[in-house]
Image: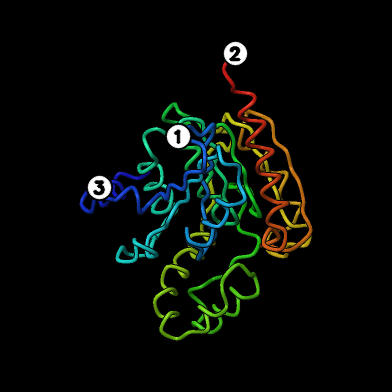
Amino acid sequence: MSPDHTDAYREDPEDPENVVWVLPGAAAHPRISLLVLPHSGGNAHSYAPWRDLLPGDVRLLIGQYPGRGARFSEPPPTSIDDLAGPVVRCLPPDTGDLVILGHSMGSLVAFEVARALTGAGRPPRALIASACRPPYVPNPSPVHPERLDDDALVAAIKARGGTDDGILDEPELREIIMPPIRADFAIDDAYRFTADPSVLTCPVTVIGGNADPVVPAIELPGWSAVTSARTAVGLMPGGHFYFQQQLPAFLALVTGVLNAVAAEHQPA
């Protein structure tokens, strides 16, 4: 993370509970934690219902980006560092075995979080990238929010899915949510990791929709270049937000990854 970015946040200390939501399960001692990073324009609230569909011994952590929820008063993000940096710094201190999952732009944030943790000597157990190009590939479907007025941007968001149309159609709410949404899409458009991509040491699972017009399925295997460990690629029926119509099946797949990681690292 850049020094300027870090210094800015030192002047405005972060509340870890607002940056990383902690949703414990039924078990007193979770066997593994799953950190979820939302998509462009997304927020932690939309992923909180996942808690009820995950095993009780999985602790669910969800990143909340600037400009939304309890972080509403913070300025909109301007770079991937503004999204990933606070999450890295605000992870609960007792987070041990960790799997990181991102959807769409959230996969790029997840990659940056995993990269930072790996560089700090505490790599995640696995990374799950959903509906996203590899980090070193230019965005195949840029939105160019700077060229669009609010109505055109709303139309582009609706075409992708994943956002409550009622919120987008409410003028007062639109005025509140459009600045961070614009910021997210601008970051997603511009982001490209230009260093040696093989910076992770954990296994990577890549999942996408077989009819995704935003990230074609042919892009997904390229994630194998980001890690020295194994990579698995899978497709599910649907478009860019393929999991919304089949969330139990999707989270069963995610749980399979969690189970495999937990078993692999179980003490002898």
Where residue 244 sits, quadrant-wise, is: bottom right
Q: Tell me the element at label 2.
A: loop
Residue 263 horizontal/vertical position (percent): 64, 25
Q: Quadrant of the C terminus?
A: top right
Q: Which amino acid type corresponds to the residue marked 1 in the rendered image?
A: Leu
Q: Residue at x 45, y 80 (%)?
A: 174
Comparing marks 3 and 1, which lies closer to the viewer?
A: 1
**Residue 216 image label:** none
Q: N-terminal of the two: label 2 or label 1?
A: 1
Disc 2: which residue = 268
Give the side of residue 152 with respect to residue 95, left or right: right
Disc 1: which residue = 117
Residue 43 horizontal/vertical position (percent): 48, 61
Disc 3: which residue = 7
Q: Tell me the element at label 1.
A: helix
Closer to us: 219 or 229: 229
Q: How far apart are marks 3 and 1 (CA)?
A: 19 Å
> How many C-alpha atoms fall within 10 Å of the one at disc 2: few (<14), some, or many (≥20)?
few
Q: Quadrant of the N terminus?
A: top left
From the viewer's perspective, is residue 265 above or below residue 63?
above
Give the side of residue 60 with respect to residue 67, left or right: right
Q: Which amino acid type corresponds to the residue marked 3 in the rendered image?
A: Asp
Residue 90 horizontal/vertical position (percent): 36, 44
Q: Residue furthest top?
A: 268
Give the side of residue 193 with respect to residue 137, left or right: left
Q: Tell me the element at label 3.
A: helix
From the viewer's perspective, is residue 29 above or below residue 134?
above
Closer to us: 107 or 92: 92
